[in-house]
Amino acid sequence: MGTRCGDIDPAVVEFICNKENKTASEVLLMFNKESGVYGLSDGLSSDFRDLEKAANEGNELAANAEHIFAYRVAKYIGSYMVAMGGVDAITFTAGLGENDKNIRKEICDYLAFLGVKLDESKNDLRGEEVVISTDDSKIKVLVVPTNEELAIARETVALVSNK
C-alpha cells in the first residue's frame, strides 16, 4: 500500500502520541493514510505514476520514495527467499508490477548478486505475460498481468452457485 508506513515497532504509537500530543486514532490514521511513498514524497501522491512523473521532472523526494520502495521490496524478496530456501522464479504482477519497468529494474538490480539478470528489452514490454530475465539468469523473473475483474466475477459466480 502506497500510504502505509511499513514495518514499525508498535511501541512507537504511544511515543508519538505523547510527543506530538495526538490520539492513538490520529497516529494510526497517519500510519495508514499518510505514510509510505505518500509520506516520503511529502504528500505528493501514493500513485507511482505521479511519483515517476515528478521524479523525471527533478523532484528528489519522489525519486527517493521510489528508491526506498524498490529497496524495501528487494529486502522482502530476499527474506522470503531465505525462509523458503530459495526460489525458482520472481513474479511481478498487479498495477505497479505490470507497468513500472523502472521499479522492476531497480528491484532486480538489488538482486543481481543472487544471479538475477534482467533483459532490458523484455522489461520494456507492458500488458502481456512475459519472462523478463535473461536466459542465463539463475532465477527466472516474470511479469504476469492480473485480471481483477475476471477474478471478482468468478468468485461471484462461485458464491451464487453454492446457494
Image (cartoon, helix red, strand yellow):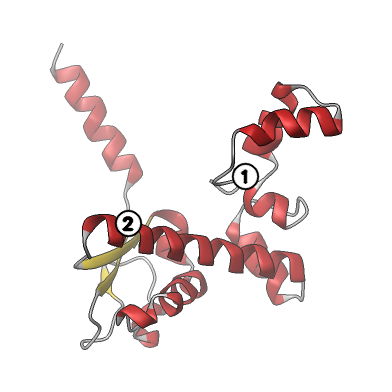
The residue positioned 71% from the left and 56% from the top of the image is: 40
Q: Left of 110 or right of it: where is 127?
A: left
Q: Quadrant of residue 155?
A: top left
Label ID, residue 11: none
Q: Quadrant of residue 64?
A: bottom right
Q: Quadrant of residue 153?
A: top left
Label ID, residue 80: 2
The residue positioned 46% from the left and 61% from the top of the image is: 73
Q: Secondary structure at mark 2?
A: helix
The residue positioned 86% from the left and 27% from the top of the image is: 21
Amino acid type shown at disc 1: Thr
Seen as rendered, the residue at the extreme top is 163
Amino acid type shown at disc 2: Tyr
Pick the residue in front: 2 or 82: 82
Label ID, residue 3: 1
Q: Earlier in the sequence, mark 1 or mark 2?
A: 1
Question: Horizontal and vertical percent for residue 161?
Answer: 14, 19
Q: Secondary structure at mark 1?
A: loop
The residue positioned 76% from the left and 50% from the top of the image is: 43
Q: Residues within 10 Å of mark 2 (few under 14, many from 20)?
A: few
Q: Quadrant of the C terminus?
A: top left
Question: Horizontal and vertical percent for residue 42?
Answer: 78, 54
Measured along the vertical axis of the image, is residue 99 above or below residue 56? Answer: above
Label 1–label 2 contact, CB within 8 A? no
Q: Left of 148 or right of it: where is 20?
A: right
Q: Nearer the viewer, mark 1 or mark 2?
A: 2
Give the Cα distance between marks 1 and 2. 23 Å
Seen as rendered, the residue at the extreme left is 162
Question: Horizontal and vertical percent for residue 151?
Answer: 27, 39
Pick the residue in front: 153 or 10: 10
